Image (cartoon, rainbow, N blue to C red):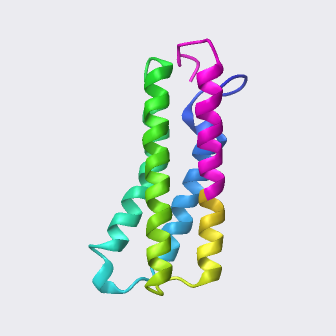
Amino acid sequence: MVGDIKTHKDLLVWQKSMDLVILIYSLTKQYPKEELYALTNQIRRCVTSIPANIAEGSGRKNKSELIQFLHIALGSATELETFLIISTRLQYINSEQYEEANHALNEVIKMLCGLINSLRTNNNTSTAHL
């Protein structure tokens, strides 16, 4: 979190997670109506939790709080991974749709892990530059 990064919206991981939200909402539109308040709702809640927690953590005063919220975002990402597998097994999405969503999700997971590791090795404890 250096250079031209002023807010969470400047973070590539936040941008990619927002793209993931759009992708997942598009996929879940095709789910059966009886899943609207069950699996569809759970999937949408966890995917929106990813960029929301990145944003909330970025607004905190210190690095340890940011890292905590990035871990929460990571937890939501792994929860989404499980829901995508369930969706495939229930045949709500096909293997091509699964691969597209899983690829985008894995990219976000790798970026979250990279950011967490980078923040842990950086000595600055403030997030004031965000």
**Is 58 situated above or below 72?**
above
Give the quadrant of the C terminus.
top right
Q: Relative to 41, does residue 72 appear above or below in the rendering?
A: above
Q: Is residue 47 visible?
A: no
Please identify the quarter of the rendering in which residue 38 is found: bottom left
Residue 51 horizontal/vertical position (percent):
49, 46
Q: Is residue 94 above or below residue 21?
A: below
Residue 113 on the magenta segment: yes
- Residue appearing at x 42%, y 42% in the figure: 72
Compared with 67, 24 (above or below) is below
Residue 75 % position (x, y): 44, 48
Looking at the rendered structure, the number of numbered marks drawn on it comes to: 0
Q: What are the residue bounds of the magenta stretch? A: 106-130
Residue 50: percent from left, percent from top: 47, 49
Q: Residue at x 62, y 31 (%)?
A: 117
Image quadrant containing the N terminus: top right
Q: Give coordinates of residue 10: x percent, y percent.
A: 63, 36
Question: Residue placed at 51% from the left, 60% from the top?
Answer: 21
Instruction: Say whether residue 45 is left or right of residue 73.
Output: left
Give the dominant element type of the magenta stretch: helix, strand or loop.
helix
Q: Residue at x 47, y 45 (%)?
A: 73
45 within the magenta span: no
Which one is nearer the viewer's eye here, 48 or 117? Answer: 117
Left or right: residue 102 versus residue 75 is right
Can residue 90 be seen?
yes
